[in-house]
């Protein structure tokens, strides 16, 4: 209809289908055209790029990603939005480069095997891929924590998450936000908050600010060279150690049934939250690999 904004048109078309966003599914749609273009332009995508998008919703970001010429593999849980997206994409530039999977990106707390099947069908790995998404708040933590634990992580990530989660992803040792999620992510990626995003650019509006976060795969990262079972054990190690994050390291190791692992008294008196990512990787390697201790 004449005079409609992009959001008014989207709202009308979804309303004609009897659709209303579900807060339980974290459906807060990004509607600011400038921000959508900015996110899609984060990595200068082109026709050779493969992009994974999680929770595309009605496709506002998807359309901008396709406009770069990139191939987009999207995972959508809501079949109503999936049908709407396919219908809309038929009229978009490069709409034929969209591949939509209807289903959950997570399976029993891990990234779905379907993701890796679809990536493999498109040559990844060794073909690198990029993850770009306005991540539903309900799945952002498990998805990002699993990126470094999986066998085929993305080379780059640009995603919108809750502001506090963004701070956790990029947190430094000794801060209150520093913990297992950020450590797992930083063990595989360089994490950076690019900007703070107001609730005003979403419909419906969330109650909190968001963060645009970028991750870049760390070349030669120790975690990525480990076998899957060792990576999983490292995640368990962090969760158990940080359950007593403010207590001396000696207490945390004792709770794991580990000895001091040859650490000095000064080292054992430090708190887990004071240890850097590489220090934690080294501590885990010493206990799990060299000493053969379990988690």
Image (tube, grey):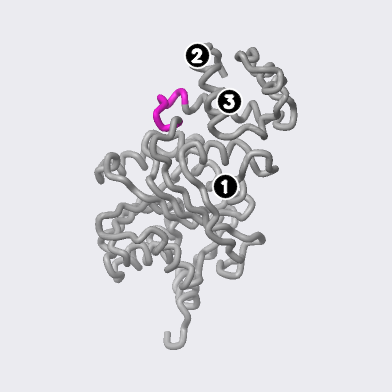
Please give the label number shown on residue 93.
none
Whole-percent x, y for residue 76 in the image: 42, 53
Residues 284 and 206: in front is 284
- Residue drawn at x 51%, y 65% is 30
Callout 2: helix, strand or loop? helix
Q: Looking at this rendering, what residue extends furthest in the bottom direction?
A: 2
Give the quarter of the figure containing the C terminus: top right
Q: Are marks 1 and 3 in contact (CB under 8 Å)?
A: no
Looking at marks 2 and 1 on the same chain, the residue that comes earlier in the sequence is marked by 1
User: In x, y percent, where is residue 89?
Assistant: 32, 66
- Residue range in magenta is 223-230
Residue 25 visible in the current orientation = no
Who is closer to the viewer here, 212 or 20? 212
Label 1 Cα crowd, 10 Å radius (few <14 / some 14-19 / many 20+): many
Task: Relative to 130, say whether 44 is above or below.
Answer: below
Q: Is residue 220 above or below residue 88?
A: above
* Proximity of marks 3 and 2: CB atoms separated by less than 8 Å: no
Q: CA distance from mark 3 to mark 2?
A: 15 Å
Residue 54 in the image: above or below residue 260: below
Quarter of the image that includes the N terminus: bottom left
Q: Secondary structure at mark 1?
A: loop
Which residue is denoted by mark 3 in the rendering?
237
Q: Is residue 154 above or below residue 35?
A: above
Q: Please name the residue that numbered disc 1 is placed on.
A: 170
Dot 2 corresponds to which residue?
Answer: 290
Residue 128 within the segment the image draws in magenta = no
Using the image as rendered, state which of residue 295 and residue 225 is in the foreground.
225
Q: Are marks 2 and 1 in contact (CB under 8 Å)?
A: no
Disc 2/disc 1 C-alpha distance (Å): 30 Å
Can you give x and y, in whole percent of width and height, for residue 55 in the image?
45, 54
Q: Give the residue displayed 41% in from the left and 51% down from the top.
A: 131
């Amino acid at each position: 209809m004449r005079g409609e904004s992009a959001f008014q048109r989207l709202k009308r078309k979804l309303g004609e289908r009897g659709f209303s966003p579900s807060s339980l599914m974290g459906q807060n749609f990004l509607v600011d055209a400038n921000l959508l273009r900015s996110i899609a332009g984060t990595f200068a995508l082109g026709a050779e790029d493969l992009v994974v998008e999680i929770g595309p919703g009605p496709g506002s970001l998807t359309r901008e990603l396709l406009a770069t010429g990139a191939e987009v593999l999207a995972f959508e849980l809501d079949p109503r939005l999936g049908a709407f997206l396919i219908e809309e994409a038929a009229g978009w530039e490069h709409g034929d480069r969209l591949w939509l999977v209807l289903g959950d990106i997570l399976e029993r707390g891990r990234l779905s095997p379907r993701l890796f099947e679809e990536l493999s069908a498109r040559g990844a790995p060794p073909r690198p891929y990029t993850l770009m998404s306005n991540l539903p708040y309900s799945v952002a933590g498990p998805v990002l924590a699993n990126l470094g634990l999986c066998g085929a992580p993305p080379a780059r990530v640009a995603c919108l998450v809750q502001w506090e989660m963004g701070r956790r992803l990029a947190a430094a040792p000794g801060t209150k936000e520093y913990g297992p999620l950020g450590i797992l992510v930083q063990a595989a990626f360089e994490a950076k908050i690019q900007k703070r995003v107001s609730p005003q650019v979403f419909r419906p509006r969330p109650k909190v600010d968001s963060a645009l976060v970028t991750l870049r795969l760390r070349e030669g990262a120790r975690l990525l060279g480990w076998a899957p079972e060792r990576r999983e054990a490292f995640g368990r190690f962090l969760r158990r150690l940080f359950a007593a994050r403010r207590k001396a390291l000696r207490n945390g190791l004792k709770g794991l049934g580990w000895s001091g692992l040859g650490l000095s008294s000064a080292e054992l008196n430090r708190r887990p939250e004071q240890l850097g990512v590489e220090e934690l990787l080294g501590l885990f390697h010493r206990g799990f690999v060299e000493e053969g201790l379990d988690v």
